[in-house]
Image: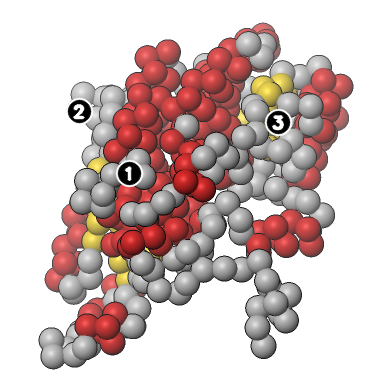
C-alpha cells in the first residue's frame, strides 16, 4: 500500500542520506521563512527580543520584591526556556525555578510566586491555562508570545506585562526570541545577572556561528555539515558534561527528532553516566562495532546501525566563583570508553565569557546540523506531517 493510500501523502524523503543534497541548491531553506534562514537570524532574534522585553514594563515585577518561586509554563521549546533560566541562574539562585509542562499551575502557587507563561503562537492551551490560573490566584504574571494573540488578551485583562515576540518561524527555530524575555524578567527579580554585554556577546557568537555554518560553505569548513554527515545513519547519543551542557544536549535531541526525524538519547552525564552508559556495550554499540569485517562490502557494512556519541563539554570558566566548577571526570571517562570500543565520538566544547554565551556556543552549530541532516535525507524540516497531525488531534496544542 502506498503512502497516499495510507493517508500519509505529505511524507517525503529518502532513508539513505546523500551529502550532495547539502552541497547543492538550498534556496528553499535560505529564503525568508526557511529553516536555515531562521537559524541564521538567531543573533538578530536575540537583539530584537531584548529590545522588546526592555519596553514591556518588566521592571514592575520588582515592586513586590523577591518571589517565593518562579514557574515557567509552556510546552516544547517554550518549556526549554525554563530549563535555560534555571541553568543560567545556577545552583546558587535564591529561589526555586520550576518548568511546568502541563495545563494550569502547581497547587502551591499563590500570591508570593511569579508565573512566566510562554507560547510562541500565543495560543498554547498549557500556557493559557497557566496564565489564567496565575491571575486567578494573585500570582505575579509575565506572558511572552505572539502579538495580537489570546495570550496577549489574557495578560491585558490581568494587567500583567506582555512581551510581544513576532512569530516568523516555528517555535523550535525561535528559541532565542522566546528565551531572552524570560531571562530579562528574572533579571528584574534579581535572580540572574544579565548585563548588556552578555546579550551583545551572545548575539555576536550566534552571528559568527551562522557565518561558519552558511549553506555555501563546503563540509570540510562547515562544522554543521560535518556533524550532520557524521551522524547520518546512526543512533545519536548526545550527552552534556554539566547542567548547562545538559540543556544543550536535550535541545539537540529535540532538533534531531523534529527536523531530522532521528531517534535520540540525550541528557546530562550526571544523570545518565551510570545506567545509560551501558548503551556503549549494547547491540548498537560495541557489539555492532565488533562485527566489522575488513573484507566486507563497505555498502553492506553501512547497513548496520551504530551509535554515534556527541559529547557537549563544558569545563566552566576560570576564576568564576559564582557557580561550582563542573566535574570533567565523567566526560573524560565517556570519551575513553567510547574510544576503546571503537564507537565514534564528536566533542563540542563550550566557549564564551558568560553562561548565556557558553550555552549559545553549544546550541548554534548543532541546530544547523539538524537541518542539514534533514536536507541530506531529502526531508523538509519546516514541514513535519506527524507534528501537524498531532496538533490537529489534540486541539491545537503547541
Q: CA distance from mark 3 to mark 2?
A: 39 Å
Mark on residue 146? 3
**Residue 216 image label:** 1
Looking at the image, which residue is at 24% across and 40% down? Answer: 315
Check disc 3 and report its element: helix, strand or loop: loop
Q: Residues within 10 Å of mark 3 (few under 14, many from 20)?
A: many
**Which numbered disc flags the more N-terminal residue, 3 or 1?**
3
Q: CA distance from mark 3 to mark 1?
A: 32 Å
Where residue 165 sits in the image (x, y, percent)? Answer: 64, 27
Q: Which mark is residue 318?
A: 2
Does dot 1 land on a helix, a strand or a loop? loop
Percent from the top left, x then y, of residue 386?
66, 64
Q: Residue at x 77, y 40 (%)?
A: 123
Asked whether disc 2 touches disc 1, contact meaning CB atoms under 8 Å apart, the reply is no
Number of numbered labels in the structure image: 3
When asked about the image quadrant of residue 169, the answer is top right
The answer to whether one can see residue 274 in this image is no
Amino acid at each position: 500500500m502506498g503512502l497516499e493510500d495510507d493517508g500519509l501523502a505529505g511524507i517525503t524523503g529518502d532513508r539513505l542520506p546523500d551529502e550532495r543534497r547539502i552541497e547543492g541548491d538550498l534556496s528553499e531553506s535560505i529564503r525568508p521563512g526557511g529553516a536555515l534562514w531562521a537559524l541564521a537570524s538567531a543573533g538578530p532574534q536575540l537583539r530584537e527580543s531584548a529590545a522588546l522585553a526592555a519596553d514591556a514594563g518588566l521592571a514592575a515585577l520588582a515592586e513586590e520584591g523577591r518571589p517565593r518561586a518562579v514557574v515557567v509554563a509552556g510546552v516544547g521549546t517554550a518549556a526549554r526556556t525554563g530549563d535555560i533560566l534555571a541553568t543560567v541562574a545556577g545552583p546558587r539562585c535564591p529561589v526555586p525555578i520550576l518548568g511546568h509542562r502541563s495545563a494550569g499551575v502547581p497547587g502551591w502557587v499563590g500570591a508570593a510566586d511569579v508565573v512566566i507563561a510562554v507560547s510562541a503562537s500565543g495560543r498554547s492551551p498549557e500556557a493559557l491555562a497557566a496564565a489564567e490560573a496565575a491571575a486567578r490566584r494573585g500570582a505575579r504574571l509575565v506572558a511572552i508570545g505572539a502579538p495580537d494573540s489570546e495570550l496577549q488578551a489574557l495578560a491585558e485583562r490581568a494587567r500583567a506585562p506582555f512581551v510581544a515576540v513576532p512569530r516568523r518561524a516555528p517555535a523550535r527555530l525561535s528559541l532565542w526570541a522566546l528565551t531572552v524575555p524570560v531571562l530579562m524578567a528574572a533579571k528584574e527579580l534579581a535572580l540572574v545577572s544579565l548585563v548588556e554585554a552578555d546579550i551583545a556577546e551572545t548575539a555576536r557568537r550566534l552571528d559568527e556561528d551562522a557565518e561558519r555554518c552558511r549553506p555555501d560553505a563546503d563540509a570540510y569548513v562547515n562544522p554543521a555539515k560535518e556533524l550532520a554527515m557524521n551522524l547520518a545513519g546512526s543512533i545519536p547519543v548526545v550527552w552534556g558534561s554539566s547542567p548547562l551542557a545538559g540543556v544543550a544536549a536535550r535541545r539537540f535531541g529535540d532538533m534531531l527528532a523534529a527536523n531530522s526525524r532521528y531517534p535520540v538519547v540525550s541528557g546530562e552525564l550526571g544523570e545518565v553516566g551510570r545506567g545509560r552508559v551501558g548503551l556503549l556495550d549494547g547491540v548498537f554499540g560495541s557489539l555492532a562495532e565488533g562485527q566489522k569485517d575488513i573484507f566486507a562490502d563497505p555498502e553492506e557494512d553501512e547497513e548496520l546501525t551504530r551509535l554515534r556519541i556527541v559529547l557537549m563539554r563544558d569545563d566552566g570558566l576560570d576564576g568564576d566563583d559564582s557557580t561550582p566548577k563542573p566535574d570533567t571526570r565523567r566526560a573524560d571517562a565517556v570519551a575513553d570508553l567510547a574510544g576503546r570500543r571503537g564507537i565514534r565520538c564528536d566533542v563540542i566544547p563550550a566557549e564564551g565569557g558568560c553562561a548565556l554565551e557558553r550555552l549559545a556556543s553549544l546550541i548554534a552549530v548543532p541546530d544547523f546540523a539538524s537541518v542539514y541532516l534533514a536536507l541530506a535525507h531529502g526531508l523538509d524540516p519546516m514541514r513535519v506531517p506527524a507534528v501537524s497531525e498531532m496538533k490537529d488531534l489534540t486541539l491545537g496544542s503547541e
